């Protein structure tokens, strides 16, 4: 939704577009190294807009 | 207990102990998700606040701002979708992180210049010497204006803010007349500035907004409204957040020690300070139709205000909500609002605050509230902040 919390916290997993909205980098599948970051980005989204599935 | 019309509690917000005990004041309101206040309803639970802020067609921002009777269109806050969507789409790229982030070295330099004299002197009044001037300088930087206009802008800004605080009053006193005169000066200045910049290429945000191509191009009136809103929404909010944050850090040396020992913790600390003290804690809406909030029916035309500081203390989302904790694993506070009207300047505000907290604590790790002074929150007001914050530098003797 454009708060920018996800890509601020987890720049390896999420990125921003030119409107400042968040998007997932690549196909959205992350390795174990980035899993914690991915979860932190989702857990801190003010709009609860991100779902992380195992 | 089911909520019915009869059981809706009433709270008199004017008598809340906000000036010296704001946590207590917010706690008074956190017992009920919906209460009646002087000007309508107050939504205080996270659930109800989400319901209101995520349904702009039912809960109108435009109708809520109509009462201000602003002489300029307050773009985009005083609009609802679809007009508001268009404005946001045009404006968002200018305030996105990829545009804001490059300002960092310049902002860091400016903040260091403000802090250095205080290191030498050993004491300061933080609100007027740092928190008020820094965001104003950032505005001037962003709009490509000379920094020596700073004090003039602070004077104009205070006049316009006092005017909007007085909106709705029926009598116009001398102070209000003076305020109107200042607002007119600012209006004239912006009008001339816009005429000068239109059609001239430039790196600053104002020039870029003015050079947006049709069909997105904004009229002079719309751009003036945007400038006014930027001044109304972007300057005192950062000032008030910084004042509150520094007060809590001064009063909690153990928490402060955490960020001094590990500066990487500053972003999380900043979010936690923001959670506890939203500077614009009341977000007004007016219903466009009869609607349900929980078990309660609100008639069309009801004023319902989201109380962000209370929603940020909803213990279903924040365990031990009154505790200052820099290690919350999820901190989904809504100090910048949520939904379509969420703060356009949040990326800039966060950068300003982070830079200040970092540079300050690197130079001034030890400080306390000056003996014999007490910071007060001005109250009642639509935005909250400290009147002053006197700090003494150094470890307590």
Image (tube, helix red, strand yellow):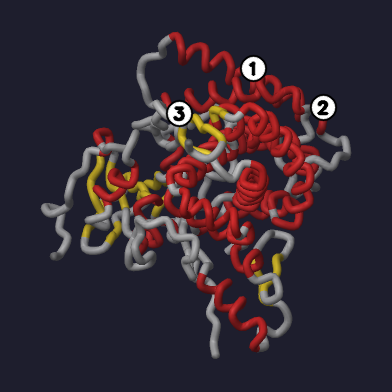
Q: Residue at x 73, y 44 (%)?
A: B108
Q: Residue at x 56, y 78 (%)?
A: A39
Please report, as a chain letter, where disc 2 is located: B
Instruction: Return the x and y of residue B360 as percentages of the image width and height.
Output: 63, 43
Q: Residue at x 34, y 52 (%)?
A: B310
Give the labeled residue for mark 3.
Answer: B387
Instruction: Tell me the crowding category of disc 3: few under 14, some 14 to 19, or many 20 or more residues within 10 angstroms, Cα based.
Output: some
Give the labeled residue for mark 2.
Answer: B196
Q: Residue at x 23, y 50 (%)?
A: B35
Q: Residue furthest bottom?
A: A54
Q: Secondary structure at mark 3?
A: loop
Q: Earlier in the sequence, mark 2 or mark 1?
A: 1
Q: CA distance from mark 3 to mark 1?
A: 26 Å
Q: Nearer the viewer, mark 3 or mark 1?
A: 3
Q: Quadrant of the image for the C terminus of chain A?
A: bottom right
Instruction: Return the x and y of residue A1 as percentages of the image width and height.
Output: 57, 64
Q: Earlier in the sequence, mark 3 or mark 1?
A: 1
In the image, taking residue B243 as reference, residue A13 lies left or right, namely right
Please report, as a chain letter, where disc 3 is located: B
Q: Secondary structure at mark 2?
A: helix
Q: Residue furthest right?
A: B201
Q: CA distance from mark 2 to mark 1?
A: 17 Å
Q: Is residue B212 above or below residue B326?
A: above
Give the labeled residue for mark 1.
Answer: B185
Q: Have a look at marks 2 and 1 and say if they share a chain.
A: yes
Instruction: Return the x and y of residue B126 as percentages of the image width and height.
Output: 55, 32
Q: Work out whether residue B167 can be spotted.
A: no
């Amino acid at each position: 939704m454009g708060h920018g919390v996800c890509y601020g916290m987890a720049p390896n997993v999420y990125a921003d577009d030119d409107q400042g909205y968040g998007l997932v980098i690549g196909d959205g599948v992350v390795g174990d190294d980035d899993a914690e970051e991915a979860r932190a980005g989702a857990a801190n989204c003010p709009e609860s807009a991100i779902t992380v599935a195992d | 207990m089911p909520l019915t019309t009869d059981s809706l509690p009433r709270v008199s917000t004017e008598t809340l102990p906000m000036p010296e005990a704001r946590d207590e004041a917010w706690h008074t309101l956190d017992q009920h998700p919906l209460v009646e206040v002087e000007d309508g309803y107050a939504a205080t639970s996270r659930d109800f606040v989400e319901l209101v802020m995520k349904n702009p067609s039912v809960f109108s921002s435009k109708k809520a701002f109509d009462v201000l009777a602003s002489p300029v269109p307050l773009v985009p806050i005083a609009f609802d979708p679809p007009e508001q969507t268009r404005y946001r789409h045009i404006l968002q790229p200018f305030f996105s992180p990829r545009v804001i982030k490059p300002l960092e070295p310049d902002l860091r330099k400016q903040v260091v210049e403000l802090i250095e004299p205080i290191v030498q002197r050993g004491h300061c009044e933080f609100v007027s010497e740092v928190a008020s001037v820094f965001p104003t300088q950032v505005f001037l930087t962003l709009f490509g204006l000379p920094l020596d206009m700073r004090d003039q802008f602070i004077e104009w800004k205070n006049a316009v803010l006092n005017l909007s605080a007085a909106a709705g009053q029926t009598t116009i006193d001398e102070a209000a007349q003076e305020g109107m005169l200042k607002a007119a000066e600012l209006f004239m200045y912006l009008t001339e500035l816009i005429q000068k910049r239109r059609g001239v290429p430039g790196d600053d945000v104002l020039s870029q907004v003015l050079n947006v191509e049709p069909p997105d191009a904004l009229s002079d009136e719309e751009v003036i409204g945007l400038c006014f809103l930027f001044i109304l929404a972007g300057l005192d909010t950062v000032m008030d957040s910084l004042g509150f944050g520094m007060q809590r850090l001064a009063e909690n040396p153990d928490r402060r020690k955490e960020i001094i020992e590990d500066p990487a913790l500053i972003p999380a600390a900043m979010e936690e300070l923001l959670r506890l003290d939203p500077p614009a804690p009341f977000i007004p809406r007016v219903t466009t139709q009869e609607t349900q909030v929980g078990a309660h029916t609100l008639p069309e035309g009801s004023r319902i205000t989201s109380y962000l500081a209370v929603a940020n203390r909803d213990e279903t989302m924040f365990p031990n909500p009154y505790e200052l904790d820099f290690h919350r694993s999820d901190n989904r506070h809504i100090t910048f609002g949520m939904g379509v009207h969420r703060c356009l300047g949040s990326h800039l505000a966060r950068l300003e605050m982070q830079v200040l907290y970092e540079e300050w604590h690197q130079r001034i790790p030890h400080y306390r509230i000056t003996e014999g002074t007490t910071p007060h929150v001005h109250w009642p007001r639509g935005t909250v902040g400290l009147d002053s914050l006197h700090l003494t530098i150094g470890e307590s003797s």
